[in-house]
Image (spheres, rainbow, N blue to C red):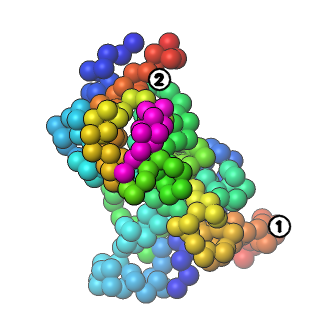
């Protein structure tokens, strides 16, 4: 089984290609959207490449849930994610740092949950499932 | 101008590969500006033809039920050019496919000469998608008579081979 460091190395390569950034920019704490400039289209490209590189299957919305905190789903009130919402986020994004996010739970910060560290943990869990 | 950058669909193996051709001709106005005295097929239009070939390959897989949109070109490399009189052959291979979209790899060549290679990502959008609001066509990429290229040459295909050689 690949170690997290090995996974990180491969993810750095995938993201450098998919997003046109330097390997060094792809640090564990880097956020996909804020730091690396990923757009929604890139998420699909990243999913394809993760599946190919790690020989895993990623279901739709499993890694990048769509319409997180969309209006009317009760996740947030007045642009702030509620306690219930935080619980749901923990369920849907088990590898993200929701505790860190809860310190400033603005809806616009939800995108910052998608970090390289989260990707590494997601892949580590997926690859150990299949072994 | 019709936004059809392939002349004929030659082969389609469902869910696997597709081949289309584009004949480059001096009757195309833009070649006189690109470039004066040195007419070559614009790389961007070559990419469009490659995307149309790959887009039909992907769309066919779901019987053109999805709205297929060119989303991203992660890789494209041009190795040489195509000039009037050349027949560009676009060979598309389906790399990945899932509910959200798909990826194709397309190689463009003239005879034995490699001209370009690209990887192209398409997304499927639902008619219900709010971002699509107002598009009432069954399909976006396959509108504007693009699908007509699937029929090109079919009427003539029944003509006996001997008749053609007799005129040569």
* Up-down relation of residue A82 to residue B31 (above or below): above
Task: Name the element at disc 1.
Answer: helix
Residue B55 lies, in percent from the top left, at: 57, 59
Residue identifier under label 1: B158
Residue B73 lies, in percent from the top left, at: 40, 56
Numbered-mark total: 2
Q: Looking at the figure, which quarter contains the C terminus of chain B?
A: bottom right
Residue B131 part of the magenta-drawn span: no
Q: Nearer the viewer, residue A109 or A26?
A: A109
Q: For the residue carrying disc 2, how many other residues have a C-alpha within 10 Å: few (<14), some (14-19), or many (20+)? A: some
Q: Quadrant of residue B153?
A: bottom right
Magenta-tinted stretch: A80-91
User: At 39% across and 58% down in the image, what residue appears?
Assistant: A78
Residue A96 bears which disc, if any?
Answer: none
User: At 43% across and 21% down in the image, what residue appears?
Assistant: A125
* Up-down relation of residue A58 to residue B134 (above or below): above
Residue A126 bears which disc, if any?
Answer: 2
Q: Are marks 2 and 1 in contact (CB under 8 Å)?
A: no
């Amino acid at each position: 089984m690949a170690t997290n460091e090995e996974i990180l190395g491969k993810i750095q390569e995938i993201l450098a290609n998919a997003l046109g950034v330097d390997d060094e920019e792809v640090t564990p704490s880097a956020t996909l959207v804020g730091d690396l400039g990923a757009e929604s289209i890139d998420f699909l490209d990243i999913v394809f490449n993760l599946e190919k590189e790690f020989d895993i299957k990623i279901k739709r919305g499993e890694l990048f849930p769509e319409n997180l905190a969309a209006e009317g789903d009760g996740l947030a009130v007045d642009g702030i994610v509620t306690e219930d919402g935080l619980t749901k986020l923990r369920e849907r994004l088990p590898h993200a740092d929701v505790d860190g996010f809860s310190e400033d739970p603005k809806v616009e910060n939800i995108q910052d949950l998608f970090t390289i560290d989260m990707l590494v943990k997601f892949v580590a869990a997926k690859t150990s499932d299949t072994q | 101008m019709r936004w059809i950058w392939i002349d004929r669909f030659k082969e389609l193996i469902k869910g696997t590969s597709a081949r289309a051709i584009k004949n480059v001709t001096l009757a195309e106005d833009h070649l006189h500006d690109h470039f004066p005295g040195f007419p070559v097929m614009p790389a961007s239009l070559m990419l469009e033809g490659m995307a149309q070939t790959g887009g039909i390959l992907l769309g066919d897989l779901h019987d053109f039920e999805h709205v297929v949109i060119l989303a991203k070109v992660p890789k494209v490399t041009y190795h040489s050019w195509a000039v009037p009189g050349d027949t560009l052959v676009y060979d598309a291979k389906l790399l990945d496919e899932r509910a959200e979209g798909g990826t194709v790899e397309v190689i463009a060549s003239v005879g034995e000469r490699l001209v370009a290679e690209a990887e192209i990502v398409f997304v499927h959008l639902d008619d219900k998608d709010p971002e699509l609001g107002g598009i009432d066509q069954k399909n976006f990429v396959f509108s504007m008579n693009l699908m007509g290229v699937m029929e090109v040459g079919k009427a003539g295909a029944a003509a006996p081979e001997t008749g053609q050689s007799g005129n040569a």
